[in-house]
Image (spheres, grey):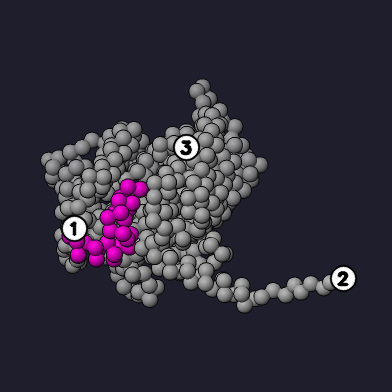
Amino acid sequence: MEERNLTIDLDLFDNIYRNLSVIWCIKMNDIVDINGLIIGHFPFVDIVPYITPFSLALVATIVTFTVFLAISNPEYRSITRFKEDVVRKETVEKKEARFRRFMTILCGVALIGVVTTGDIFNFALFVSLTGISNIGIFAGIKDTHVLDAAFQYGLVLMICSLPLFGGVALILANTGTLSLGVLGNLPSNQIINVGRTLLLIGAVGEGALAPFFATKVEMIRAKGAPFINMMHLSSLMVFTRIIELLLILG
Amino acid sequence: MYYPVNFNLIYILLEIITAFIFGGLLLGLHRKVMARIQGRPGPPIVQHLLHTFKFYIKELSIPNTSSMPLYVAIVLAMDAVWILALIVGPILGGSFLIIIMCYAVHKVAEHGIGLASGSPYTKLGSTRAVLSATAEMPLIAVPALVFFKTDTLLLDGIINYQIVNGSLFTQLPLVALAMFVLVLSKTPYSPFGIVWGKDIVSGYKTEHFGVIRGVMMMGEILAFFALLWCFITIFFGGIITAPLAYMVAMTGITVILAFICALTPMVAPYHAVMIQWIFAILAVVNVLLI
């Protein structure tokens, strides 16, 4: 039987890796103009997560909030009823709190992905994950108004996943890349602009931002302050990141 | 440009103390002007600062319905983000997007403060904080339109652009108006201040007393100073450069804000949303016209 030589030319890989890194670094001007100096990047071929002062500030905020929200106890609510001379205190049940706390942490992890990724498909995936975890935060609540609102939000999530991923697909089809480092330096055209608009609509829907925020206002009637606060944080972090993304794509 | 070697802890500390004292005096002036317009003598200008210091020596009481440690941590977060904004803005001349992030986190903090106490009044305040997050539209419009004009969002770069090409205020007046609305919405007694409306006692602040209230007031002072600084830098960066000029400009804008707050009633929550959207759309129209 013929023996095959399976040695790998490491020098060749090293050269490709170095060249791609250099090309990416040269092409990061737009990101630098928006975010400030790039502190570090991880060159996985053309998918390059990067760290700038802006993303660092976002990550620090998200980690701090996630830790504090995860260790906080839910608040109590004072309930009084007509013809009863008693003030009752209600809070979230332990089993429900455990699940919602898990969803809060998951949402925080997804948000870190949203703000650090250098790839628009990963961005879309992480934004979807924040949407799903937000629904999870409210799914276990035994309140008809809240569940109705969560149902409406779920519908918006599903509908908006189409423009979100559609926008990404359109940009990929037009440019052949998903990397923000490369996309930031490509000249804009009408198809990219349509893709950007779809991406914005998708992210706005997934993050329950205006004008889709009405259901969010209804949902936060629920008990469980630490978990509910995470939803608002996720909305505004997605919103902050989408501004950066749209400007880089421009 | 944005280099960590610019960090000088003593300078940063002095900057924050200056921002706190001058911001407090500006808010005192704001109350004084409002009072004079309404035919009252009003409190002395240092009253807002004294009021803040007073809370530091008051007893701290935490409601037994509150969510701990969120009740305390969220107030500290409000201060922390504006200290970050002061470091990134005036000291490092960094990205305007970080200031926008601080503004967004301030809204999250307002929401969290309202939720954490368990009181129905603070809960209403926090619900309004979520509703008022529709100020997102001017928040998107302002950095995007400034970037389209200047090709940079670094504050140093925006100042350099204005030194060469003239003030952005004359080129993008409606975008400046949208940013002014953002500053107005964070001013005390603002027509858009639905989150702390007196119809819901004091909104999200109702259940915070003692040191915690003092810390919260410090955050609000730093926020007011940072937003005014940002507004002046982004739209008058080429004209106003000296610290004294900044102080005069901040005082002038505070007086204008006081006139608006004194003469305008607090609008209904949905009207607040609608008006802020109108200003964001006007900003976009401004850019389309040029």
Q: Position of residue B179 (x, y in %)?
A: 27, 49
Q: Earlier along the polypeptide chain: callout 2 or callout 3?
A: 2
Image spot of residue A130 (x, y percent): 54, 46
Pick out the residue farthest to the bottom. Answer: A11
- Residue B263 in sight in this render: yes
User: Which residues, given as a range, are shown in magenta?
Assistant: B140-166
**Would residue A132 be found to the left or right of residue B271 on screen?**
right
Q: Residue B167 carries which label?
A: 1
Q: Which amino acid does label 1 sit on?
A: Ser
Q: Position of residue A1 (x, y in %)?
A: 87, 70
Q: What residue type is labelled 2?
A: Met
Left or right: A141 as drawn, with respect to B112: right
Specify the label residue A216 is tagged with: 3
Which residue is labeled 2 in the image? Answer: A1
Of residues A91 and A133, the one drawn nearer to the viewer in this rendering: A133
| Circle 3 crowding by C-alpha within 10 Å: few under 14, some 14–19, many from 20 | many
Could you give the CA–CA distance between mark 2 and mark 1, rounded to whole angstroms?
79 Å
With respect to residue A68, does A128 lie above or below?
above
Q: Tell me the CA gap for discs 3 and 1.
A: 39 Å
Q: Residue at x 17, y 38 (%)?
A: B263
When the figure is inspected, residue B209 is found, relative to residue B53, above or below; the finding is: above
Q: Disc 3 or disc 1, which is closer to the eye?
A: 1
Residue at 72 percent of width and 75 percent of height: A7
Real-space Cα distance between discs 2 and 3?
Answer: 68 Å
Task: Tell me which chain the residue with mark 3 is part of.
Answer: A
Q: Does the magenta stretch include residue A115?
A: no
